[in-house]
Each structure stands twice: as structure tokens, then as C-alpha cells.
Image: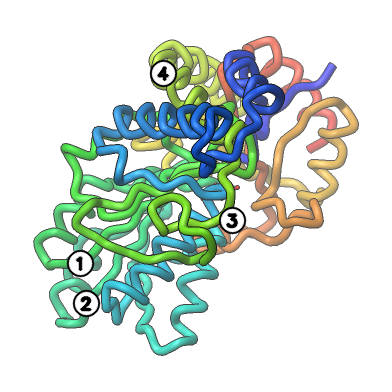
């Protein structure tokens, strides 16, 4: 038996998504840039997915650009906004996903001023500090702050952040890779210039994502070539995966409440059981207030290092994660948890859920944790 509690890393593909993708992997093999029938069929698949995403977000189809994933979408937003919109300053945070954090730092090394907003104990941006940063400079500013933190699940108030950006004439980019499909996002209620999403966090395929670019902001390409995706993202489109991403979002939005109910039930039971069996446990991030319900990050008071905890869990059939998984599969010390001041002598594990998880799986996990921690 395997118990998969690492859904913030990636999620299993749902059946409807696979079904939607298969024809584009087999019969509908045309190049979407070709004018003939095969090409038009492929193009139609892409445009249907674009429409689904646009409608879900309350955007227009011309504002959605497909990318190779969340990483590329975030890099495009940050690097092209700086290059094409005369941005001289970025306000971001120390708990952004590495694809934002490292892109921001790279820009910092290239004559763009980088400022980090203060965070509260949960890793949430301090709005007063953000306002003081925005009001203290005339430089054209890009604010890049994520919606849901991928390690601890804390949510940022993107509506209020957007309102501040609008008030002070700044651009607002938000990474919604973890939240999209779980939390409704309606752009008509929000001031957002750039927003990113990724297929594989919502039971869609890996290697595909999108960037929403508000129509008032014209940016050029990060990747040059044949001019696909309205010249913002060249390269022959990953047709089947784009179709899968559209289907995954459609299914996620349709099932949003039902999935949320199931996940919240399992998550709150897990919290209750953890408190009961591990009285010294420490919860990281805002686990009870404004949080993403798919993520629960806890620290155990134990001498066992986190790599060993995860290894032993894995041997017992349970997949969880430490900080962020780097590409070698090893667990690095978490930059996010460092900022959040995990108590000395504690080791942190991220459990992240999908609607497939059950209370029975929680019982089994608790039993095994009791043996391991
Ligand atoms: C918050 C956040 N942003 C961006 C990414 C990167 O997305 P992708 O894996 O599609 O490149 C991730 C993936 O872990 C994430 O959690």
C-alpha cells in the first residue's frame, strides 16, 4: 500500500484529463501552426483550453499564454516586465518559490533594485510595510508575491495587495501555482497584471502551465522563435498537455467544493490526531486561519533528521516531503522555514493532500509516525 501525501509537489493525473489528452497524442498530431486540417484540429484543442482557463479566471482568451510550466510563466512575467515595462524596482518576499526568488535575485544582479517585504510569523506579507515601500519611491515597481505558499500553505491577501499596487501605480505579479483550481480566483474582483498557473498541481500533466497577462500590459518574448502564443512564447505548442491543463482546470473548478470538503475533513482529522499523539508538535504557517487546505507543515521535536524521517516514512509506504525537493531528489534546508523560525531541535515535514486521501490513511500515517519520530 502507498499513501501519497505530497500533492504540493505534484498530483496524479485524473482520468478525464488523460482521456482528453489521448486523441492529441495519437490521431490529432498536427502542428497547430499548420493551415491544413490536422493543424487546425490541433489548434482548436489549444484554443478550447485557452477559453476554459480564460472563463475560469474571468479573463479574455487573448490574455492567456501557454508555457512549459509555472517556472517559465513566473520567469516570463518577472524578466519581461522588467525589460519591456520599464520596471526599475521589484518588491518580493523571502518565501517565494525558487523560480520567483531566483529570477528576482538575478534581476537584482542586473541593476534592478530588489526589496523584500517584511513577513509575519506565518510568512504572510506585512501590508503596512508593503504600503510604506510602495509610497517611498517614484521608481516603476513590480510587486511579485505568491498567493499560496507551497511549503506551509499560508495565503497572501492578493485582493489587498492588488489594491495597494493599483493605488501606487505598481505592477502586480502573483504566483498562483498552488492555489489555482483549489481557491476561486476571479480577476474581475482583483487588480493583477500577471498571474501564473501550472498543470501538474491540479491533476493535470507536468511540463505545461500558463501566464495571464493583463491586456493593458504588453510584454515581448522570453523565448524567441516562430512567434507562437501571440509572439510571447515561441516553440511548437505542447498540444496534448495544453488540452490536459484545460481539462484539469475545468474538472477542478467543477469539483472544487466537493474536493475541498473531502480534503478539509482529512486535514482537520490529521491535525487533531497529530495534536493528540505528538503534544509537542509545532505547526508551521497559518494552519488554522487563511491557509491553503491542501498543505500542512509540521515540526516534530525529535533527534531524527528530516531526511531520515522521510526515508523511514517512505519505507513504510508513505510519501511526504521536507523543504522543497531539489532536482536531485534530496531535501535541502528550507529557506521558507528558516524565515518562519522553527524551534530549535525540531524537524519539519510537509504533508499535502488531494481528494484521494482518506481518514484511514491518516490513521495509518499516525501509527507509523509514532514508530518513527
Ligand atoms: C508556488 C510554486 N510556484 C511555481 C512552481 C513551479 O511550477 P512548475 O513545476 O510547473 O515549473 C511550483 C512548483 O513546485 C510552486 O509550488
Residue 165 in the image: state x and y as whole percent. 18, 61
Q: Secondary structure at mark 1?
A: loop
In the rendered structure, the answer to whether residue 7 lies left or right of residue 320 reads: left
The answer for how far apart the CA atoms under marks 4 and 3 are is: 35 Å
* Visible residue check, residue 202: no
- Residue identified by numbered label 4: 256
Label 3 or label 1, whichever lies nearer to me, is: 1
Label 2 or label 4, whichever lies nearer to me, is: 2
Q: Earlier in the sequence, mark 4 or mark 3?
A: 4
Report crowding for label 3: few under 14, some 14 to 19, many 20 or more residues within 10 A (C-alpha): few
- Residue identified by numbered label 1: 170
In the rendered structure, the answer to whether residue 253 lies left or right of residue 10 reads: left
- Residue identified by numbered label 3: 343
Q: Secondary structure at mark 4?
A: helix
Residues at circles 2 and 1 in contact by the CB criterion of under 8 Å: yes
Q: Which mark is residue 140?
A: 2
Residue found 44% across the figure and 65% down from its top: 221
The answer for how far apart the CA atoms under marks 2 and 4 are is: 37 Å
Residue found 27% across the figure and 62% down from its top: 218
Q: Is residue 294 above or below residue 134?
A: above
In the rendered structure, the answer to whether residue 25 lies left or right of residue 63 reads: right
The answer for how far apart the CA atoms under marks 2 and 3 are is: 39 Å
Amino acid at each position: 500500500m502507498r499513501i501519497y501525501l505530497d500533492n504540493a509537489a505534484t498530483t496524479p493525473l485524473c482520468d478525464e484529463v488523460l482521456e482528453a489528452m489521448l486523441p492529441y497524442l495519437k490521431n490529432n498530431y498536427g502542428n497547430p501552426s499548420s493551415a491544413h486540417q490536422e493543424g487546425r484540429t490541433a489548434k482548436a484543442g489549444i484554443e478550447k483550453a485557452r477559453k476554459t482557463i480564460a472563463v475560469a479566471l474571468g479573463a479574455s482568451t487573448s490574455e492567456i499564454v501557454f508555457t512549459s510550466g509555472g517556472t517559465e510563466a513566473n520567469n516570463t512575467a518577472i524578466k519581461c516586465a522588467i525589460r519591456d515595462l520599464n520596471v526599475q524596482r521589484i518588491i518580493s518576499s523571502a518565501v517565494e518559490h525558487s523560480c520567483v526568488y531566483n529570477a528576482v535575485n538575478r534581476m537584482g544582479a542586473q541593476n534592478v533594485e530588489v526589496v523584500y517585504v517584511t513577513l509575519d510569523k506565518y510568512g504572510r506579507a506585512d501590508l503596512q510595510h508593503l504600503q510604506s515601500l510602495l509610497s517611498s519611491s517614484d521608481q516603476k515597481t513590480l510587486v511579485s508575491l505568491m498567493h499560496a505558499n507551497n511549503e506551509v500553505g499560508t495565503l497572501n491577501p492578493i485582493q489587498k495587495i492588488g489594491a495597494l499596487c493599483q493605488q501606487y501605480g505598481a505592477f502586480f505579479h502573483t504566483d498562483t501555482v498552488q492555489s489555482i483550481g483549489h481557491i476561486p480566483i476571479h480577476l474581475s474582483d482583483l487588480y493583477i497584471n500577471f498571474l501564473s498557473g501550472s498543470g501538474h498541481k491540479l491533476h493535470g500533466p507536468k511540463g505545461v502551465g500558463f501566464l495571464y497577462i493583463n491586456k493593458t500590459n504588453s510584454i515581448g518574448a522570453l523565448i524567441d522563435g516562430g512567434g507562437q502564443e501571440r509572439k510571447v512564447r515561441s516553440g511548437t505548442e505542447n498540444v496534448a498537455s495544453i488540452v490536459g491543463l484545460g481539462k484539469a482546470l475545468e474538472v477542478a473548478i467543477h469539483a472544487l467544493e466537493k474536493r475541498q470538503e473531502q480534503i478539509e475533513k482529512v486535514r482537520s482529522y490529521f491535525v487533531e490526531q497529530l495534536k493528540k499523539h505528538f503534544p509537542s508538535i509545532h505547526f508551521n504557517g497559518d494552519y488554522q486561519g487563511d491557509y491553503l487546505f491542501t498543505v500542512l507543515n509540521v515540526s516534530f521535536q525529535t533527534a531524527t533528521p528530516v531526511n531520515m524521517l522521510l526515508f523511514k516514512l517512505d519505507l513504510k509506504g508513505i510519501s511526504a516531503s521536507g523543504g522543497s525537493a531539489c532536482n536531485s531528489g534530496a531535501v535541502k534546508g528550507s529557506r521558507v522555514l528558516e524565515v518562519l523560525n522553527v524551534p530549535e531541535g525540531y524537524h519539519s515535514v510537509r504533508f499535502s493532500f488531494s481528494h484521494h486521501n482518506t481518514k484511514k490513511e491518516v490513521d495509518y500515517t499516525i501509527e507509523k509516525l509514532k514508530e518513527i519520530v
